[in-house]
Image (cartoon, rainbow, N blue to C red):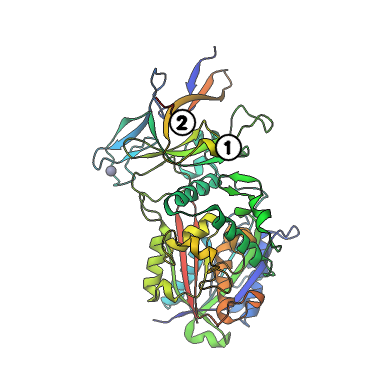
C-alpha cells in the first residue's frame, strides 16, 4: 500500500484576530498550505475539516472555490484535527484519492468554555452545584498524580516557563513573551495546584495541511513528511476522565495510552525513536502526565526530565517546541493540526529560531480532550 | 422554616436522620455507579438495582474552586458573596469514587487520604420558596 505524505503546511496565527471570522482564518490557512505545496484548491480531490465555534468547515468552499470536491465535516472535540487527519490518511491509503486537504479553524468567545450538562448526558444539578468545570478535573488529576509519583510544584512551573519561552520565538504563537519563574509562581490560583499561567485559554486560529500519495509527493515539495500513523481512541471503563460524577474503583489506562501504543505499532517504531514531540498541554500537568502516558518516560521520571531540561529544544526529547497550547491558546478545531504543522517544520528543518538541532527525522503529536478521547500521529522523513 | 427538598431526586436518601448517597449496582458484574443508572457502564448489562453507597469515605483527590463559575452554576451567591469551595473525589467503601463539593476550601485543610463524612446542605431556593438541598463532604471530626 502507498504511504501518505504531508506536502503543504499553512497556518493563520493563533490568538485574537478581531477583524476575521473563524471561517476566514481557516481559508487563509488553507490558501497558505496550498501555496506551500505549490498547488491550488482545484487540484484537491477531497477535504476534511472541522471547527467547534467557527461554523461549518465545508462552507470554506465559498471562499476557496466551488470545485465540487468531496468535503466532509469532522467534529470530534479536541481530537477534531486528529480525526480529520485520520480520515485523510485512510482516504489516500485505501487508494480512493491521491491528493487532498485537511483544515481546522476556530474562534471562541473570551473566557473559559461553557459546557452544558445536558450535552454530556448529565443532569442540571451537576452544573448548578459547580462541578462542571474542566479546570477542576485537570487540577484533580495532576493533584493525585503528584501525590502518587512525587511530582513537585517546581516541575509544574518549569513546564510553564518552557512553554512561554518557546512561544516567544514562535512568530505564529499567541503568547510571545517569556515569563520569569517568579511571574509564573505568583500568578493568581485558579484551581489548586494550577494557577493562571499553568492553563491554556480558548483562542482563535486556523491550520491546514495538504496530503498526497507518497509516490507523488515530489510533484509538490522537495521535503515531504510521511504520516506513518494516525490513530484516534476513546476512553475505557475506569479511565479517569472529565465530567464524571463518579469514577470506577480501579483506574484504567487513559485513551492516550491505547492510542499511543497503536500508533507505535502501526509505525513499527518505539518511543525511543522519537526525536521531537508535541503533547497536549491544556495545562502544565497534562504535559507532564502525557510524557509518561505516551511512553516517553516512566511515571515520576518527569521530575528529573524537567529539572535537567530534557524537554527543552536542545534536550533529549524536545516537547512543544512552539509553546504548545499554553503559548498558542486552544482554538479547538485547529489545535491538533498546529501540532502536526510544527512537527513537519521541525522535520523539514524550517523551524527557525526553535529548530531542534541535528536534523530530527521522527516526530510525534498527541491530543487529548473531553470526554476522554485521544489522537496520536507519528511523522517521519 | 422553609421546606427542604433535594435539588435532584435520587442522589441521596432524603429526608433522613442519617442520609447516605444512593447509586446503582450491576446485578451481573457488581460494579457501582453514581448517580444510579439503568444500564451498566462496565459490562453493558441492563440489570441494575438502587443501593445505598454509605455516608463516609476517604479523599482520593481534591482541588479548590477559587472563582465563581459562570452559568450553568446556580446558587445563592453573587460575585461579591462568593466563597471558594473545595471539590474532590471521595472513595466510598464499595470502591467507587464520587465527585463532590467539599466544605473545606483551603489547601491547609485538605489532603489525599483524609476521612470524609457526608452532609446535606442548601444550594438555593426555588420559585416557591422551597430550599433546594445537595450533598457535600467534609473532613471527619476525629473521635
Ligand atoms: Zn455490569
Label 2 CB sits under 8 Å from any ligand 1 atom? no
Residue B52: x %, y % from top left? 33, 29
Q: Is residue B2 above or below residue A210?
A: above
What residue is rendered at 47% in x and 60% in y?
Answer: A290
Label 2 resides on the chain identified as B
Residue A63: x %, y % from top left? 67, 67
Residue A262: x %, y % from top left? 38, 67
Looking at the rendered structure, which numbered label has been put on residue A232? none
Quadrant of ligand 1: it is: top left
Q: Are marks 2 and 1 in contact (CB under 8 Å)?
A: no
Q: Which residue is mark 1?
A: B72
Q: Which residue is mark 2?
A: B139
What residue is rendered at 59% in x and 81% in y?
Answer: A349
Residue placed furthest toward the top: B1
Left or right relative to B22: residue A291:
right
Label 1 resides on the chain identified as B
Camera-side mark, 2 or 1: 2
Closer-to-camera residue (A243/A76): A243
Left or right relative to A95: residue B108:
right
Q: Is residue B130 visible?
A: yes
Residue A187: x %, y % from top left? 66, 49
What residue is rendered at 51% in x and 15% in y?
Answer: B3
Amino acid at each position: 500500500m502507498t504511504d501518505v505524505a504531508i506536502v503543504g503546511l499553512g497556518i493563520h496565527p493563533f490568538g485574537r484576530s478581531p477583524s476575521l471570522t473563524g471561517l476566514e482564518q481557516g481559508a487563509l490557512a488553507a490558501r497558505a498550505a496550498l501555496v506551500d505545496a505549490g498547488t491550488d484548491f482545484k487540484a484537491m480531490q477531497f477535504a476534511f475539516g472541522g471547527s467547534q465555534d467557527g461554523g461549518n468547515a465545508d462552507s470554506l468552499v465559498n471562499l476557496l472555490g466551488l470545485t465540487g470536491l468531496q468535503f466532509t465535516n469532522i467534529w470530534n472535540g479536541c481530537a477534531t484535527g486528529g480525526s480529520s487527519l485520520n480520515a485523510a490518511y485512510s482516504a489516500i491509503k485505501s487508494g480512493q484519492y491521491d491528493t487532498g486537504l485537511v483544515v481546522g479553524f476556530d474562534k471562541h468567545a473570551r473566557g473559559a468554555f461553557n459546557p452544558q450538562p445536558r450535552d454530556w448526558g448529565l443532569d442540571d444539578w451537576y452544573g448548578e452545584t459547580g462541578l462542571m468545570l474542566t479546570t477542576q478535573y485537570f487540577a484533580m488529576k495532576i493533584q493525585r498524580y503528584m501525590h502518587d509519583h512525587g511530582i513537585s510544584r517546581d516541575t509544574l512551573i518549569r513546564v510553564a516557563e518552557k512553554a512561554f519561552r518557546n512561544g516567544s520565538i514562535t512568530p505564529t504563537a499567541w503568547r510571545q513573551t517569556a515569563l520569569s519563574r517568579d511571574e509564573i509562581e505568583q500568578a493568581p490560583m485558579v484551581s489548586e495546584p494550577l494557577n493562571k499561567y499553568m492553563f491554556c485559554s480558548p483562542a482563535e486560529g486556523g491550520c491546514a495541511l495538504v496530503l498526497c500519495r507518497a509516490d507523488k509527493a515530489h510533484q509538490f515539495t522537495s521535503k515531504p513528511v510521511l504520516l506513518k500513523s494516525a490513530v484516534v481512541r476513546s476512553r475505557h471503563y475506569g479511565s479517569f476522565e472529565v465530567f464524571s460524577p463518579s469514577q470506577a474503583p480501579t483506574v484504567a489506562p487513559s485513551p492516550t495510552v491505547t492510542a499511543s501504543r497503536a500508533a507505535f505499532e502501526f509505525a513499527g517504531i518505539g518511543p525511543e525513536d522519537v526525536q521531537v514531540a508535541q503533547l497536549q498541554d491544556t495545562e502544565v500537568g497534562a504535559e507532564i502526565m502525557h510524557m509518561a502516558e505516551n511512553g516517553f518516560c516512566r511515571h515520576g521520571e518527569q521530575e528529573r526530565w524537567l529539572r535537567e531540561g530534557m524537554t527543552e529544544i536542545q534536550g533529549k526529547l524536545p516537547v512543544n517546541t512552539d509553546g504548545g497550547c499554553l503559548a498558542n491558546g486552544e482554538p479547538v478545531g485547529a489545535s491538533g493540526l498546529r501540532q502536526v504543522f510544527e512537527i513537519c517544520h521541525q522535520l523539514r528543518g524550517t523551524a527557525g529560531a526553535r529548530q531542534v538541532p541535528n536534523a530530527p527525522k521522527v516526530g510525534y503529536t498527541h491530543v487529548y480532550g473531553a470526554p476522554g478521547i485521544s489522537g496520536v500521529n507519528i511523522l517521519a522523513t | 422554616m422553609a421546606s427542604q427538598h433535594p435539588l435532584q431526586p435520587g442522589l441521596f436518601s432524603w429526608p433522613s436522620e442519617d442520609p447516605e448517597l444512593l447509586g446503582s449496582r450491576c446485578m451481573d458484574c457488581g460494579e457501582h455507579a453514581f448517580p444510579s443508572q439503568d444500564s451498566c457502564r462496565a459490562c453493558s448489562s441492563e440489570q441494575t438495582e438502587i443501593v445505598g453507597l454509605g455516608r463516609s469515605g476517604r479523599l482520593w483527590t481534591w482541588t479548590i474552586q477559587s472563582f465563581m463559575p459562570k452559568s450553568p452554576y446556580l446558587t445563592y451567591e453573587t460575585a461579591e458573596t462568593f466563597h471558594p469551595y473545595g471539590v474532590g473525589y471521595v472513595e466510598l467503601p464499595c470502591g467507587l469514587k464520587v465527585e463532590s463539593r467539599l466544605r473545606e476550601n483551603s489547601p491547609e485543610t485538605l489532603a489525599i487520604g483524609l476521612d470524609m463524612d457526608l452532609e446535606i446542605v442548601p444550594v438555593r431556593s426555588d420559585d416557591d420558596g422551597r430550599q433546594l438541598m445537595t450533598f457535600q463532604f467534609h473532613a471527619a471530626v476525629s473521635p
